[in-house]
Image (cartoon, rainbow, N blue to C red):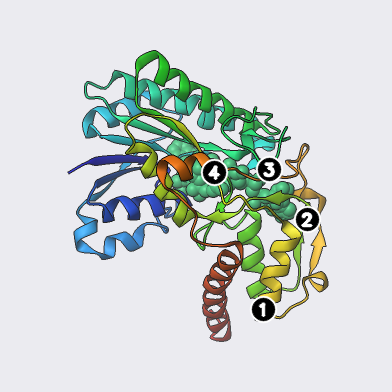
Amino acid sequence: MKIALITGITGQDGSYLAEFLLKKDYEVWGITRRSSSFNTGRIDYLYKDPHEKSRLKLVYGDMTDGVNLSSILNDIKPDEVYNLAAQSHVRVSFDQPIYTANVDGIGTLRLLEAVRKMQKPAKFYQASSSEMYGKAVEMPQSEKTPFYPRSPYGCAKVYSFWQTVNYREAYKIFACNGILFNHESPRRGETFVTRKITRAATRIKLGLQEKLYLGNLDAKRDWGFAGDYVEAMWLMMQQDKPDDYVIATGQTHSVREFLDEVFGYLELDWEKYVEKDTRYYRPTEVDVLQGDASKAEKYLKWRPKVTFKQLARMMTDADMKLAKQEKILKEHGQ
Ligand code: NAP
Ligand code: GDD
């Protein structure tokens, strides 16, 4: 049985990847952070299946603690390491640039060092990001497009990208960068724009909320479904040679278009509810991202399955269920 280790298992992608690898009969280990409240909400459902529960194991760790990462790797001896842990919010990275660099940049280096020093060779996946293209110098962006990061988060991810390439070349480690464009799901964190919109729109529909405050509505992103994207991570790790791949839908849409899609589906006019709030603007913005995933299509035989419209509706349907539960509790005075 293959053993996988996932950093960031409690996040959106970590939960989908854990589910995917368990279905492939892996033993899955995940690193979680100690928290004063429960932070395993996205993976708790995996414990309901007794077969999967016995192959899912959690261990405490942190990307800022290299000694602990090394001892985890030496204990578990994974075949594949997926580095998904990050302070992943671009706006927050402007408020916490040094912490973001420590976790998203040096944290990757700590993990690569731990992999290098393992007795048994392990494959390594780095969660690289389309944010590295930032002020994109060409459209669409491919593996050949130069990086121009526009945030402390983007800069830290560029650092990790090159460390991953360097460990591949210097130490012959099977190390891959997945350059993933934005991917969303009902498990997306509620402060990212898509989920913020589906949560608010469904609550507005049920009379639980009056307004939605947003920043730049003109930004355009290449939005795909997280469930599709974790398969691409795994496929990269099954190739004969390690390499870097763009994972994207090839379509780009504005925040405004996402509002149209979600509020339209709920038969609401978003212009009546949405207000601008400068708090959500960034000092430097990434105006438009659009990925060219033809390399992944050619070599990994990977293609996204869920469309923009299906994604918006899937997220809206899931959040409508939450809003209905919230309304019932409210009506019962809870
Ligand atoms: P996410 O939902 O924010 O999850 C981030 C995970 O990292 C969580 O499990 C979090 O733990 C963990 N984490 C944060 N700081 C940590 C630390 N110091 N030590 C250990 N763990 C830590 O992010 P995601 O959307 O799943 O994204 C997964 C990865 O892909 C990230 O590296 C992100 O930067 C990258 N990425 C994401 C996208 C996207 O569109 N989603 C696109 C490209 C790249 P807690 O649960 O305890 O907070
Ligand atoms: N979060 C947020 N909140 N974004 C807003 C808002 C708002 O109220 N209003 C407008 N936006 C705009 C942002 O300015 C940005 O241009 C766009 O919506 C998308 O913002 P996010 O959903 O926060 O995602 P992101 O593109 O900045 O970053 C995500 O994708 C990256 C891949 O390109 C994150 O998942 C990163 O971790 C990931 O690397």
Q: Which residue is mark 4?
A: 293
Q: Residue at x 27, y 46 (%)?
A: 28
Q: Secondary structure at mark 2?
A: loop
The answer for how far apart the CA atoms under marks 2 and 4 are is 25 Å
The answer for how far apart the CA atoms under marks 3 and 1 are is 28 Å
Q: Which residue is mark 2?
A: 217
Q: Tell me which label, 2 or 4, sits earlier in the chain.
A: 2
Residue 193: quarter of image: bottom right
Q: Which residue is mark 3?
A: 91
Q: Nearer the viewer, residue 305 or 46?
A: 305
Q: Nearer the viewer, residue 153 or 142?
A: 142
Decide if residue 287 is on the left or right side of residue 173. Answer: right
Q: Tell me which label, 4 or 1, sits earlier in the chain.
A: 1
Query: Extreme bottom residue here?
Result: 331
Query: Residue 81: x and y, percent?
Result: 34, 35
Residue 52: quarter of image: bottom left
Decide if residue 263 is on the left or right side of residue 59. Answer: right
Query: Residue 80: x and y, percent?
Result: 30, 36
Identity, as a three-letter code, of the amino acid under mark 4: Ala
**Residue 11 visible somewhere in the drawing:** no
Identity, as a three-letter code, of the amino acid under mark 1: Leu
Q: Up-down: is 331 above or below 110? A: below
Q: Residue at x 69, y 63 (%)?
A: 258
